[in-house]
């Protein structure tokens, strides 16, 4: 998966009572493609950037508009592992609770969100990328153990 440069995150003003999400998208389209709230798409978008940066390093902004052969692609497994790390970094022991609240209960859900974003033009994929790349990459219960589970060990 790769970030889609033309639709890179942009700040948009929030409507009264709504949280501002930097993705400028048609939320009705995304909701029709996958049963996840805007926060889930926002998290995956930020997590993709975090993972790409972790694997490939910072992007050289001076070359961003210039044609480049540099691939900043990551596969589904790399993205799932990056999203796990990003969730733990951002939410700590509450990561599983936060993800469950957004209907994300397994790595397959990451794949559904990613491919909904691909269909909406927010991410790019290669012909080698498929939803199967996201199946059972890791066990959510083990990866996101709660405070009570850690205390019992």
Image (tube, rainbow, N blue to C red):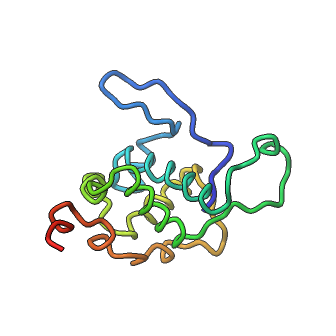
Residue lying at the far top of the rendered structure: 16
> Is 121 situated left or right of 35 in this image?
right
Q: Which residue is found at the position 82% from the left and 45% from the top?
A: 63
x and y, in percent, of residue 50 in the image: 55, 53
Residue 2 x, y percent position in the rendering: 63, 58
Q: Name the quadrant of the N terminus.
A: bottom right
Nearest to the observer: residue 38 or residue 52: 52
What residue sits 51% from the left and 39% below the top?
23
Question: Which quadrant holds the C terminus?
Answer: bottom left
Residue 105 image position (x, y, % from top left): 29, 65
Residue 60 position (above or below residue 51): above
- The reply, left or right, for residue 13 in relation to residue 122 is left
Percent of width and height locating residue 83: 45, 60
Could you tell me which residue is drawn at 57 percent across and 34 percent down?
10
How many numbered badges does the structure rendering display?
A: 0
Q: Nearer the viewer, residue 34 or 136?
A: 136
Q: Quadrant of residue 54?
A: bottom right
In this rendered view, identify the residue nearer to me: 47 or 18: 47
Q: Looking at the rendering, which quadrant does residue 110 occupy?
A: bottom left
Q: Residue at x 66, y 68 (%)?
A: 126
Q: Is residue 149 left or right of residue 42?
A: left
């Amino acid at each position: 998966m790769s970030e889609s440069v033309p639709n890179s995150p942009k700040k948009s003003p929030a409507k009264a009572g709504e949280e501002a999400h930097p993705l400028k998208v048609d939320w009705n389209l995304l909701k029709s493609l996958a049963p996840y709230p805007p926060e889930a798409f926002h998290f995956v978008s930020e997590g993709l950037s975090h993972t790409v940066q972790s694997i490939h390093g910072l992007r050289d902004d001076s070359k961003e508009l210039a044609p480049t052969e540099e691939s900043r692609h990551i596969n589904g497994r790399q993205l799932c592992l990056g999203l796990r790390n990003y969730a733990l970094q951002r939410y700590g022991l509450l990561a599983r609770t936060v993800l469950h609240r957004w209907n994300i209960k397994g790595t397959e859900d990451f794949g559904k969100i990613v491919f909904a974003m691909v269909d909406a033009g927010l991410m790019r994929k290669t012909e080698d990328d498929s939803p199967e790349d996201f199946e059972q990459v890791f066990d959510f219960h083990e990866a996101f153990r709660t405070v009570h589970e850690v205390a019992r060990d």
